[in-house]
Image (spheres, rainbow, N blue to C red):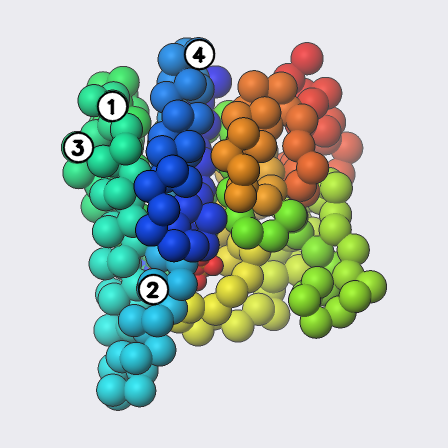
């Protein structure tokens, strides 16, 4: 199966613990060893937010803030490259063609951000579309997509499964400012909608959740399916 994994910066490097990065590298190596073709995109996490907050106070404009964010995502991507064996492309590809070329060579591209005005959710979705991925896994710090902000609203409920159309409707009103914290951004949702790629949004704190979702289709997050009558991820894999 061809799979793109989007790893939030807050999941990979909430701090700079080498064990956590190593654990993600092991899962990527294990899936690669099992014959899956993989692409990975890494987010900026708290470090990106800190840089963005400071630069905003210094008067940087939104594009400059995005460029800082992109730089941090690429730093984080390099950490994962450092933990992987020689199957990883040695530098983070800076555009989708380079990412696809790496997949074609049989390498695992570890990308960060690409252009201003989006997040790495959108990068992962566009890469998934570019490589004709069968599955896109968003490993985030929240356990899926909720109907309200679970931190602010105790009655917020997680969707087990939703269509890409429903996802687009849900995130359409979300603030797109640099560093904003949303499960999946609008650009990513719209690319998912047009491409029909199946996706899972899950809590990736334990990277084995990603491995399980890829290997068996089982997960405790939100499955995003192309249309109303579509099968669940587990059904689809059988
Ligand atoms: P992230 O993808 O980490 O954003 O990129 P996020 O959603 O705020 O982080 P998580 O998922 O909660 O950890 C960090 C910042 O880098 C810029 C944006 O400013 C984004 O907020 N960025 C990233 C871009 O401008 N373009 C990209 O392609 C990627």
Q: Is residue 139 left or right of residue 95?
A: right
Q: CA distance from mark 1 to mark 3?
A: 10 Å
Q: Earlier in the sequence, mark 1 or mark 4?
A: 4
Q: Quadrant of residue 20?
A: top left
Query: Which residue corresponds to mark 2?
Result: 48
Q: Residue at x 35, y 78 (%)?
A: 53
Against 111, residue 230 (above or below) is: above
Labels 4 and 3: the sequence-earlier one: 4
| Residue at disc 2, CB closer than 8 Å to ligand 1 | yes
In terms of image quadrants, where is residue 179? bottom left
How many marks can you see?
4
Q: What is the C-alpha distance between the residues marked 1 and 4?
A: 15 Å
- Frontmost of labels 1 and 3 is 1
Ligand 1: does it lie within 8 Å of the C-beta at label 3?
no
Image position of 59 (left or right of 10): left
Q: Say if 229 sits above or below 201 in the image.
A: above
Task: Name which of mark 2 and mark 3 comes first in the sequence.
Answer: 2
Task: State the image coordinates of residue 42 (x, y, percent, origin top left).
Answer: 36, 46
Q: Position of residue 123 (x, y in %)?
A: 38, 48
Camera sees residue 199? no
Q: What separation in Å lies between label 2 and label 1 (alpha carbons)?
A: 26 Å
* Disc 1 + disc 4, Cβ < 8 Å: no
| Residue located 56% across and 55% down the image | 183
Q: CA distance from mark 4 to mark 2?
A: 33 Å
User: If you read the primary sequence from the N terminus, does the residue marked by circle 4 or circle 2 appear first?
Assistant: 4
Marks 2 and 3, how far apart in space?
22 Å
Name the residue that disc number 4 marks: 34
**Along the viewing direction, whichever of 98 and 165 lies nearer the viewer:** 98
Q: Identify residue for label 1.
A: 85
């Amino acid at each position: 199966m061809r799979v793109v994994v989007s790893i939030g910066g807050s999941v990979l490097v909430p701090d700079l613990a080498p064990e956590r990065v190593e654990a993600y590298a092991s899962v990527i190596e294990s899936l690669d060893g099992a014959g899956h073709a993989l692409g990975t995109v890494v987010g900026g996490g708290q470090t990106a937010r800190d840089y963005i907050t400071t630069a905003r106070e210094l008067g940087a404009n939104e594009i400059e803030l995005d460029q800082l964010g992109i730089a941090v995502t690429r730093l984080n991507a390099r950490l994962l490259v450092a933990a992987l064996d020689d199957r990883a492309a040695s530098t983070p590809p800076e555009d989708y063609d380079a990412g696809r070329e790496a997949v074609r060579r049989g390498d695992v591209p570890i990308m960060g951000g690409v252009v201003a005005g989006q997040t790495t959710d959108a990068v992962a979705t566009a890469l998934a579309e570019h490589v004709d991925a069968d599955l896109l896994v968003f490993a985030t710090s929240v356990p899926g997509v909720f109907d309200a902000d679970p931190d602010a609203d105790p009655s917020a409920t997680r969707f087990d499964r939703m269509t890409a159309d429903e996802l687009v409707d849900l995130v359409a009103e979300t603030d797109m400012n640099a560093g904003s914290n949303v499960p999946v951004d609008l650009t990513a949702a719209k690319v998912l909608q047009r491409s029909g790629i199946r996706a899972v949004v899950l809590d990736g704190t334990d990277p084995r959740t990603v491995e399980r979702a890829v290997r068996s289709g089982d997960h405790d997050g939100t499955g995003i399916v192309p249309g109303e009558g579509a099968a669940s991820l587990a059904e689809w894999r059988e």
